[in-house]
Structures are given as structure tokens and as C-alpha cells.
Amino acid sequence: MKIQFLNPYWFWLFIIIPILIIYQILIKSKKRPSMIYSDITTLKPFDKGNTKLLYYFKYIFRFLAFTILVLALARPSIPEMFTKIKGKGVDILLAVDVSTSMRAIDFQPNNRLYVAKEEAKNFISMRSNDRIGLVIFGGESYTQCPLTIDHNILIEFLEQIKTGMVEDGTAIGMGIATSINRLRNSKAKSKVIILLTDGRNNSGEIDPVTAANLAKELNIKVYPIGVGKEGYSKIPIDHPIYGRQYVSQKLDIDIETLNKIAEISGTKKAKRAQNREQLKSIMMDIDKLEKTEISEKVHYRYYDLFYYFVYIALALLILELIYSKMLFKRLP
């Protein structure tokens, strides 16, 4: 807790303290009224050094009260800083392929879907001021999480996705179309779909090129990313008798169609990630291309301590009065 003084020029009054000390102790204390006693023998027991010190002790209350009052005039306050953020955000839909082929373990020791989910989470953590949603697709598509600024909830939904959640197949066009449906009423400065897939379109009512043209009309950018190595990859299959078996399958990413989607929607060219590092790099590049415009304004709120200091000063003055008039009396 840090205390700030809003009117520090009142500290100049501290110059008066030495003057008051000189006046009270060295000058005023010597100008005592005198009384004539016929015999002062009875008063001698009171004329001790410690009683003189007790007499001057009352001035401590007075000077402390004066010091506290000066501090009160200087307006002691506890500042609380808060930042108001204004920005033109980016609305982003992550469209993730959950077809069976995403179980391929060519991103050793993990499969394609696991790595795609992990890098998607890293991407989400970099976009704290943006609304992000999640669409999954296989043979059909649906929204797993609508656009939200609550990224903790989004990540929970992301962690829950797995292959086999929808009918098998690869409906890239439907994945894009479902994402467009979530973005079409957005008022964001920029609207983006990040498409993560490892195959070619073989399902759905809307083909990828038609979906890309629709995205272009609505000023939505699509960043297609092909996930997986070239050539053959092993996919785990659970056999009812022999248990888990691994079947080799050739990766069939339709990079030509993905490039066409990127070209139509204005992102120029699709990206290919054959390992986790490449996918991480691609996601970071997209993060740099789609920056959110943020402006920050810092505000301060002050908690005024003026009255607390005044109450302390008054308490000290009352203590001085009690000490002087009730506990310690001076004979003239």
C-alpha cells in the first residue's frame, strides 16, 4: 500500500516546528507568573529533574498533533490504478478436422489432432483481447463453442474434442460454411477462419470453393493449414479380437483446393505443417498478420485519508489536555 500526498506544498509548514519549540520551551516557559511564599520548604520535594521532564513531555502531544494536521492538509491518499482498454478486435473461428485420419501418429509421439489442439491452445493464449470460437467437422460439421472472450471455457471445449465425435469423412466446405455462419453478423474489424485439416473434401452439401467465395463476399479471411507428413502414416485401429492394430495409410491432403480457398479469401496460399514446429510457426505467423488494435487509458481512483489524520490529531490534542489539566499540574 503506497500513500501519495496530493497537496505536498503544505509541508512548508514544518518550518514552523523549530520556531514553536524555541517559543514554547525556551521563551514562554521562562515567563512564569510569580507568587510569594513565606516558606517553600514544603514545595522542595516537587522540584525534581524528572518532574521537569514530565512537564515538557506534554509538548510532544502538541507537536505530534501539529505534524499530523500538516500531513492531513497535504491530502494523503491511496491511489488505485486501473486501465481501460479499447480495441478493434479480431473475431476468429478455429475449424478443426476430427476425421479418423487425424489419429495418425506421424507427429511422434502424438497424433495430428493432439498436436493441432495443443497449438490451437497456444494461439488462443496469444489472443487475449479477441473473441474466438470453435467449429469441428468430419463428414458433417457443427459449432463446438460460439465466439467468446472467455478463453478458459473455449479451451475446455477444445480439450474435449476427439475423433469419432461426428460422422466420419472430410467435409471441408461444410466446416468453412458453419464458421461463416458464426462470423457473418460480426462487427469486428477483421473476421478470420483458421482451417486445420489433413484430407480432401469428400462429404457435405457445400464444396470448399463455394464456401470460400461466400467467405470473400462477407469479407472473411480463411487460413487453410494442411496437417500431417507426406507419404504413409500409421493410424491406430481397435480390433475386436486382436486389440489395437496400426494400419498404414497414405496422407491425401488436397493442397491444390486449400490453395484455391486461400487465394479466393485473400490469404494468398495454404500452409503445410509436417511437424509440430512448423505448425507452431504457421500459427505465430497468423497471429502477427491479424493483430488487434488496442489503446489503453490509465485512470486513477484515490481513497482520501484526510479525515483519519484529522481524527488522530484531535486525539493527540485531547491527550495533551488530559495530561496537562488532570494528570500533571504546574505550580506557578
Image: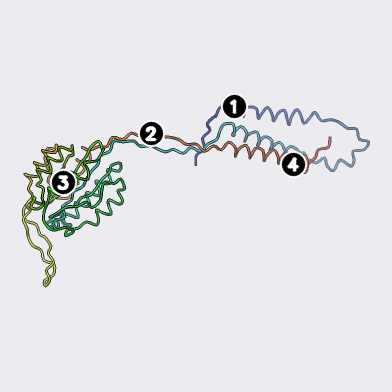
Q: Amino acid at mark 4?
A: Tyr
Few, some or many residues within 10 Å of mark 4 (<14, 14–19, 20+): some
Q: Amino acid at mark 2?
A: Lys
The residue that mark 2 highlights is 297
| Rendered location of residue 130, percent (x, y) | 28, 42
Asked if the residues shown at circle 4 and circle 1 are in contact, with their CB atoms under 8 angstroms apart, the answer is no
| Mark-to-mark CA distance, 4 and 2 | 53 Å
* Mark toward the start of the polypeptide (3 vs 2): 3
Picture residue at 52% right of the left edge, 31% below the top: 6
Q: Quadrant of residue 44?
A: top right
| Rendered location of residue 183, percent (x, y) | 22, 43
Few, some or many residues within 10 Å of mark 3 (<14, 14–19, 20+): many
Q: Amino acid at mark 3?
A: Ala
Few, some or many residues within 10 Å of mark 2 (<14, 14–19, 20+): few
In front: label 3 or label 1: 3
- Viewer-proximal residue, 101 or 132? 132
260 left or right, relative to 77: left
The residue that mark 1 highlights is 12
* Mark toward the start of the polypeptide (1 vs 2): 1
Q: Amino acid at mark 1?
A: Trp
* Mark toward the start of the polypeptide (3 vs 4): 3
Few, some or many residues within 10 Å of mark 1 (<14, 14–19, 20+): few
The residue that mark 3 highlights is 177
- Which SS class for mark 3? helix
- Which SS class for mark 2? strand
The residue that mark 4 highlights is 323
Q: Quadrant of residue 182?
A: top left
